[in-house]
Image (cartoon, rainbow, N blue to C red):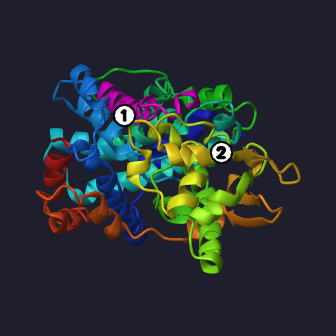
Amino acid sequence: MTTSHDITATLAHHIVNTLPDTAALNVARDGVMDFVATSLPIAQGAIHDSNLTPLRQVFSASDSLTRSVILGYVGHALDFDDYHPAFRGHPSTVILPALFALSAEDTRLREADFLAAYVIGVEVAGRIGLAAGARHYGLGYHNTATLGAIAAAAAAARLIGVSVTQTQNILGLAATQAAGLRAQFGSAVKPLHAGLSARAGLTATKLALAGFSGNATQVLDDFLSSHGDGQQHPEKLSENWGTPWRIVTPGLEFKSYPTCGGTHSAGEAAFALRQQWLAQHGDIPSLIARVENITVAFPPGGDVAPFIHKAATGMEGRFSLEYVIAAGLLEGELTLARFAEGPVDEVIAALADKVTRQPDQSAPPDELNPDARFHRVTLHLTDGESLTVTVTRQQTVAHKTDLIAKLRQNLQSLAQLDVARIQASCALHKPGDIAYLNQLLLN
């Protein structure tokens, strides 16, 4: 059996020595664009966030650790950032803040090295997600926060070019800082998790560079055993490394809607029901008047993330199947405006009150295979008729997000910005691109 020393040392060797291929680097460029598209509306003040002011008061320094907290927060504040299924969390909003913060501090760091470090970070994110096993998330941990600290540390270690031995130390220092609970979903603490996780990875890297040493041969194994509830698989940290790269397969999933990914197929089922009714009857008010109640079915445990039944604010609405389904039926879209700060829309909320969850006990538990998740939405009408649509997670994922359109739409209220230049800079093809993006992100 492989020892803990071998596992950590092998992982550190891969982090330091492997070179991502062109396909992986190209997806990384897409990831940078998506991060910028979801961060700038908050960073530049186009969308009000009342929590950003106190956050900046507390984290008011200009060092890289402080910058990583702010960048992580703004990247995840809209819950519109990318997702990785093996990680079961949002890797870029932890990894990229650490890398951007480092690059702001040391302008000698090159764009090509930045992209390679990003790929390595996502590789570690996907692998630590698999290694932690299915129970980690089920136990109540927020993977973006806990596992993200280790991924951010790996990316930071790669960017600054430390040794294998130093990287082993960095991984251990990051793992011992890992924290974050799903109980904070629906509040501003969820995006704060991303910032704190980015800072933890960066703190681990800076401590190691300064000569601070910790145990580097057992911490990862102990982390997995204490957080995996017996379902951990430490060998998955390094086996078949980069074949394929995790940023490519299963790949980053770029969101089309600013809500929890666990609501997307339910929202799309609502869209389909709306279109069916419009095709036959021509208007939505006649449908809403006839709705007696609405049921939504899914595999047992499939609503662990979207756990809020009755949303009071738009932010809570991001994690409410009921509110997402109602918004989808009424409006045929899920817009940032409906899921921003402030009270929920009363008309949407009234329809949401008619939605009831009915887990499908005949389906395998969601924890065993989240990729097999589905949502079956049924409208029960006053005349006894019912309309049903089922949308699977795989169908939702198959709809690729137009990242250029997302960038332009999210920045449309920021007329002072040069969107064409931002788009070009996200590719990180030339010197100065990172500095330009940092100037915008760290406004």
Which amino acid lies under the numbered mark 1 shown in the image of this protein? Gly
Residue 75: assigned label: none
**Is 206 contained in the magenta span?**
yes
Label 2 sits on residue? 235
The residue positioned 42% from the left and 71% from the top of the image is 23
Instruction: Choose between 266 and 369: the one closer to the eye.
Output: 266
User: Which tag, 1 or 2, sits closer to the chain's start?
Assistant: 1
Residue 117 image point, x, y percent: 35, 51
Find the distance from the CA under tag 1 to the CA under tag 2: 28 Å
Do the residues bearing badges 1 and 2 touch, measured as CB atoms within 8 Å?
no
Instruction: Choose between 222 and 55: the one closer to the eye.
Output: 55
Query: Which of label 1 and label 2 is nearer to you?
Result: 1
**Is 385 contained in the magenta span?**
no
Residue 195: assigned label: 1
Instruction: Choose between 194 and 210: the one closer to the eye.
Output: 194
Report the span colored magenta: 182-208
Which amino acid lies under the numbered mark 2 shown in the image of this protein? Glu
Identify the main secondary structure in magenta: helix
Residue 4 image point, x, y percent: 61, 33
Query: Which quadrant of the figure has residue 212?
Result: top left
The residue positioned 58% from the left and 27% from the top of the image is 183
